[in-house]
Amino acid sequence: MAWALVILAGILESGWALGLKASHGFTRPLPSLLTVIGMAASFWLLAKAMQTLPVGTTYAVWTGMGTIGTVLLGIVLFQDAVNAPRLLCLGLILAGIIGLKVFSP
């Protein structure tokens, strides 16, 4: 159950990161509100997961998932750059996330 919370928190992290761009520096009310709600929900889920899981592993998985999701969504939604070195780096982050999950108690 705790890992499901981390996964959901990571998904929400990508959402609120993109919401920061959509809010235009918190000048647009609806995107700003949704971003703050996403932040609060993501942090709450992360905190709940940390009650059970190791803090370092939990935080690393959360930030890694958020990073991967944000980069991929940035590519799809905002036409961010796509090139082999960026994709390789995302693959390394994913490998690190998987390794932390596999080797965590």
Image (spheres, rainbow, N blue to C red):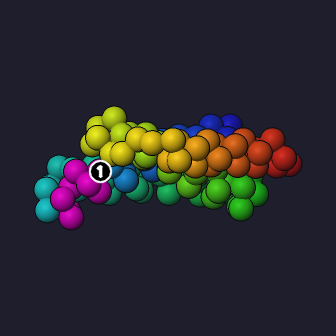
Residue, x 70% and y 49% (percent of image)? Answer: 96
Give the amino acid type for the residue marked by disc 1 in the picture. Gly
User: Going by the picture, which residue comes out furthest to the front?
Assistant: 84
- Report the side of 87 relative to 27 (left or right): right
Residue 12 sits inside the magenta stretch: no
Q: Quadrant of residue 51?
A: bottom right
Q: Is residue 44 above or below residue 90?
A: below
Numbered range of the magenta stretch: 19-26
Front residue of 97 and 62: 97
Within-10-Å neighbours for mark 1: few <14, some 14–19, many 20+: many
Q: Can residue 57 be seen here?
A: yes
Residue 38 on image: x %, y %: 38, 50
Residue, x 82% and y 49% (percent of image)? Answer: 104
Query: For mark 1, what is the residue?
Result: 19
- Report the side of 43 relative to 48 (left or right): left
- Report the side of 69 relative to 62 (left or right): left
Residue 43 on image: x %, y %: 50, 57
Q: Quadrant of residue 57?
A: bottom right
Residue 67 on image: x %, y %: 50, 51
Residue, x 62% and y 49% (percent of image)? Answer: 93
Front residue of 77 and 29: 77
Tell me the quarter of the image containing the N terminus: top right
Q: How many marks?
A: 1
Residue, x 29% and y 41% (percent of image)? Answer: 79
User: Going by the picture, which residue comes out furthest to the left?
Assistant: 28
- Report the side of 84 relative to 96 (left or right): left
Residue 53 on image: x %, y %: 74, 52
**Element type at marker 1?**
helix
Q: Can residue 6 be seen here?
A: no
